[in-house]
Amino acid sequence: MPVPVRPIARFILQACLVLALPWSGGAVAADAAPAPAARSLVAQHQAIAARLASSTFGRPVVLDSLELPEGLKGDVYAVVDHPLHTMEEALRTPARWCELLLLHLNNRRCQVTEEQGRALLTLSVVGRYDKPVDSAFLLPFVYRMTSATPDYMAVQMSAEAGPFGTSNYHVMLEAIPVDAGRTFLHFSYAYDHNLMARLATQAYLATFGRDKVGFTVLGTLPGGEPDWIRGTRGLVERNAMRYFLAVDAYLSAFDAPAAQQVDDRLQAWFSAVEKYPRQLHEIERATYLDLKREDRLRDGLR
């Protein structure tokens, strides 16, 4: 039987997008941060200092992607203007992670539950932003905050399986203080995919996603424009950047009065995304804001 590549491709795309930051709930480790992990992140910060200083993103951000035989991996390293203690406070509960993840255009609902002592975060993800939430597929992730100390925080999330041949999801956010007001963070995710998933993704990239590009510049085109990376690595890079910007937008609105936090972070995320229109533009601001406000009203959220 022929594989229906168009709907499957869209689902695969959104499964990839969802990876980029699904965490919430879970117990915080009582022990001090593992010294090797903290030292490793300090060393990484020092190793990429020059790349952060000369970043083409207009801010200290480095984005790497890797295509592996069994799947894909994306990493974002960045210095953000938020203290580590603020980041730890803002990102330590399941409900707050749901709020963060709902900034993404295609994430239409987020629910937190507990199963066998584990915190589960379940996202409802649609194949296109204008599709009804009833058409969404569900993606449940197990969350753990593995460290929360003054010098190092780390969050991990895992999922054994996703839709249409994706599996073995591994997601991590870790951070260390740079100074009193800034934090160096590393966001990483990886997943495996089988032959069906690879074929569906390639079908999407050859048709509906053929004009999509990532952020890595491979060279210069004859007209002088950058030759942006395409294909699956371009897909990973777009996903990683959208979710890094969601983290930053959520943190930027965390100290605002409660009544305006939702609108502040929606506005902040959309403004950040629109700084990279070649890679990330999808819809207009008014459409995005209306959609997100309608979702919140439907689910009884403030």
Image: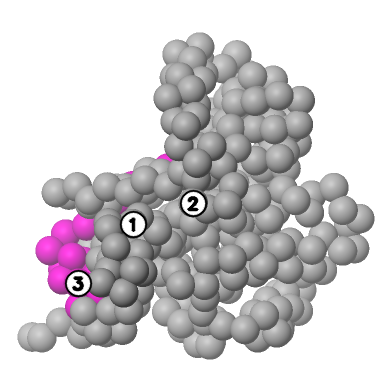
Residue 255 against residue 26 in the figure, above or below: below
Q: Could you say where residue 150 lies in the image, as x and y percent from the top left?
A: 69, 20
The count of marks equals: 3
Which of the labelled discs sits on residue 230, or is there none?
none
- Relative depth, front residue between 59 and 12: 59
What's drawn in magenta, residue-wise? Answer: 187-205
The C terminus sits in image quarter: bottom right
The residue type indicated by label 2 comes to Thr
Residue linked to disc 1? 217
Q: Could you say where residue 65 lies in the image, as x and y percent from the top left?
A: 32, 49
Image point 52% across, 72% down: which residue? 277
State how far apart marks 1 and 2 are (Cα).
Answer: 10 Å
| Numbered disc in front, either 3 or 2 | 2
Image point 68% across, 55% down: which residue? 249
Q: Could you say where residue 297 lies in the image, as x and y percent from the top left?
A: 76, 79
Within 10 Å of the Cα at label 2, are there few (<14), some (14-19), or many (20+) other Cα atoms?
few
Residue linked to disc 3? 202
Mark 1 or mark 3, which is nearer the start of the sequence? 3
Image point 56% across, 73% down: which residue? 105
The residue type indicated by label 3 comes to Gln
Q: In this orientation, does residue 171 appear?
A: no
State how far apart marks 3 and 2 are (Cα).
Answer: 28 Å
Residue linked to disc 2? 56
Residue 125 horizontal side relative to residue 183, left or right: left
Residue 61 horizontal side relative to residue 269, left or right: left
Q: Secondary structure at mark 3?
A: helix
Q: Could you say where residue 260 lies in the image, as x and y percent from the top left?
A: 87, 64
Q: Is residue 51 magenta?
A: no
- Relative depth, front residue between 239 and 100: 239
- Relative depth, front residue between 268 and 24: 268
Q: In this orientation, does residue 141 appear?
A: yes
